[in-house]
Image: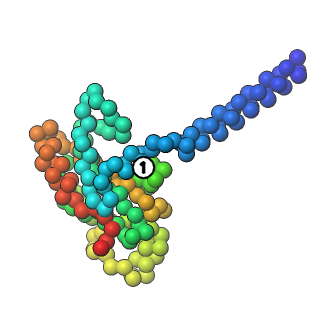
Amino acid sequence: MIRFLLWLVGGVILGGIIHIVVILTLPALAEQSIWTRVDDIEADNRIAILPPVRAGEPNPLGLDPELIYGLCRVDLDQGPAYVQGTMPDAFWSIALFNPAGIVSYSTTNRDGIGQTLDLGIFNAAQTRLLAQQQLDVAEGLLVVESASDQLLILVRLAPPHQVMRERFAQALASVSCGNQT
């Protein structure tokens, strides 16, 4: 009986280890990720407005149909990235995603920023240059340091009424995003 229990406990432990290994390796083996799905969208160093999500239609990115989304992809190896513009007077948020899909920074207009979006994104080496005053930045720039050089920048707008959706999309399209030239 004790021998049977030892085999049972050993099987459960081995099964648990196998289960954990499979769960942790599956995301790395996936052919489709958010990063690869964005390849088809021309969002390198510019804001690309994502098509509206309609109820009942496929939603592969899992987007909220009430929001307007702008996406920009930057590479900090090419220099610091900046996101600048004036946002409509409604809720908006911005998030930086690394290639693993993990949010490395996020803020909203409710953090006291108001309607002005003025964000500078730097890697560690660029932040050191900034601290040594070897890089010039405008006063009032919100400085964010990123551990990853490859980033997706997602800006979300929440129009209070559907009739304002087109005007909000145009305002989002006028936001500049990309590396300093």
- Mark 1 crowdedness (10 Å alpha carbons): few <14, some 14-19, many ≥20: some
> In the drawing, does residue 24 fall left or right of residue 13?
left
Relative to 56, is 74 on the left or the right? right
Is residue 114 positioned above or below 165 on the image?
A: below
The answer to whether 71 is drawn above or below residue 14 in the figure is below
The image shows residue 154 at horizontal and vertical percentages of: 33, 51
Residue sitting at 33 percent across and 68 percent down? 179
What residue is at 41 percent from the left and 45 percent from the top? Answer: 34
Viewer-proximal residue, 164 or 100?
Answer: 100
Extreme residue toward the top, this view? 1
In this orientation, which residue lies closer to the viewer: 176 or 103?
Answer: 176
Q: How is the image coloured?
A: rainbow
Quarter-wise, where is residue 74 in the image?
Answer: bottom left
Question: Which residue is outermost to the left?
Answer: 163
Q: On the image, which quarter does residue 33 sit in?
A: top left
Q: Is residue 169 visible?
A: yes
Is 55 positioned to the left or the right of 147 in the image? left
- Residue at label 1? 35
Task: Examine the rendering and report whether any part of residue 107 can be seen.
Answer: no
Q: Is residue 88 above or below residue 61?
A: below
Report x, y in % for residue 77.
43, 69
Q: Which of the image's four quarters has the C terminus?
A: bottom left
Tell me which amino acid carries mark 1: Trp
Counting from the top left corner in percent of width and height, residue 103 is at: 43, 51
Picture residue at 16% right of the left edge, 54% below the top: 171
Q: Which residue is painted at 11% across and 39% down in the image?
A: 163
What SS does tag 1 mark?
helix
How many labels, in total? 1
On the rendered image, what quadrant is the N terminus found in?
A: top right
Residue 37 percent coordinates (x, y):
39, 45
